[in-house]
Image (tube, coloured by chain):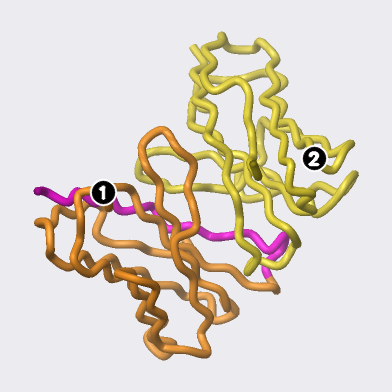
């Protein structure tokens, strides 16, 4: 089944404790990205990657890191999480970099930073 | 800065009625306008999309109306059903956008009552 998977689905952590949210897709997609979803703000892009070893900042990159060492994986790293990073996070992928390719979203990771 | 403005924030429609969600944009470079549907606990999924060379696109009960001169587009759900209850996001993008990011509206929570 074609899908984007994220782990963990739920995470509660404390301020400053480094964490990684994994994202994997099995569709051989070139383009992957991370979004955060906050009430009243919609979805905002954090980082994106157009291919292996090619990453760039989205609209809200502060406090986040990413890497793309393999085509299928695109982990999101919070080196020193803060309470304002409490949010619902979605990984997404699509076939090519052009926006008209359908974008597939993962099921989401709900992160709480206390 | 929100590049796509979406209204209303929430909407209650009776079963069988028409649900209408509106979006407006400023960036004339946008050339791809998708709508995403999100059920609770799930990631957004592409519902229907339109390019500005047509004024309307219909897929089943879902129709996008597009007004290029007014820089507005809307989603119409005909014969709304309780199963349509979800959050709907409009989005816009351009091949000239850095990273070809999808710019999302803030979302509309739709409730269809029996």
A73 shown above or below B95:
above
Q: In this picture, is B46 found above or below A42?
A: below
Q: Position of residue A98 (x, y in %)?
A: 71, 67
Q: Secondary structure at mark 1?
A: helix
Q: Circle 1 marks a residue in which chain?
A: B
Look at 61% across and 55% down and name the residue there: A103
Residue A78 location (% of width, % of height): 68, 24
Q: Which chain: orange? A: B
The image quarter in which residue B74 lies: bottom left
Left or right relative to A49: residue A100: left
Give neighbour class at mark 1: few <14, some 14-19, many 20+ (Cα, 10 Å). Answer: few
Residue picked out by circle 2: A72
**Does the segment drawn in magenta span residue B94?**
no
The residue to which callout 1 is attached is B83
Question: Up-down: is A30 above or below B5?
Answer: above
Cβ atoms at labels 2 and 1 below 8 Å apart: no
**Residue B111 magenta-highlighted:** yes
User: Does residue B11 appear left or right of residue A43 in this picture?
Assistant: left
Is A79 placed left or right of A105 in the picture? right
Residue that extends furthest to the front in the rendered view of this protein: A1
The answer to whether residue B1 of the structure is visible from this angle is no
Give the CA distance from mark 2 to mark 1. 33 Å
Q: Which residues are magenta?
A: B97-114
Q: Colour of chain A?
A: yellow
Circle 2 chain:
A
Q: Nearer the viewer, mark 2 or mark 1?
A: 1
């Amino acid at each position: 089944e074609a899908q984007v998977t994220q782990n963990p689905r739920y995470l509660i952590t404390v301020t400053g404790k480094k964490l990684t949210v994994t994202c994997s897709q099995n569709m051989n997609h070139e383009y992957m990205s991370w979004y955060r979803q906050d009430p009243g703000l919609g979805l905002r892009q954090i980082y994106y990657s157009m291919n292996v070893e090619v990453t760039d900042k989205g609209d809200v990159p502060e406090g986040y890191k990413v890497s793309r060492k393999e085509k299928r994986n695109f982990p999101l790293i919070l080196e020193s999480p803060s309470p304002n990073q409490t949010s619902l996070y979605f990984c997404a992928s699509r076939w090519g970099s052009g926006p008209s390719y359908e974008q597939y979203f993962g099921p989401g990771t709900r992160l709480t930073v206390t | 800065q929100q590049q796509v403005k979406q209204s209303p924030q929430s909407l209650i429609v009776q079963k069988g009625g028409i649900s209408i969600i509106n979006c407006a944009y400023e960036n004339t470079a946008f050339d791809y306008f998708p709508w995403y549907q999100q059920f609770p606990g799930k990631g957004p999924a592409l519902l229907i999309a339109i390019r500005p060379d047509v004024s309307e696109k219909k897929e089943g009960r879902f129709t996008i109306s597009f007004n290029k001169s007014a820089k507005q587009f809307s989603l119409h759900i005909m014969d709304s059903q309780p199963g349509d209850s979800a959050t709907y996001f409009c989005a816009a993008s351009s091949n000239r956008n850095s990273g070809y990011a999808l710019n999302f509206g803030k979302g509309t929570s739709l409730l269809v009552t029996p």
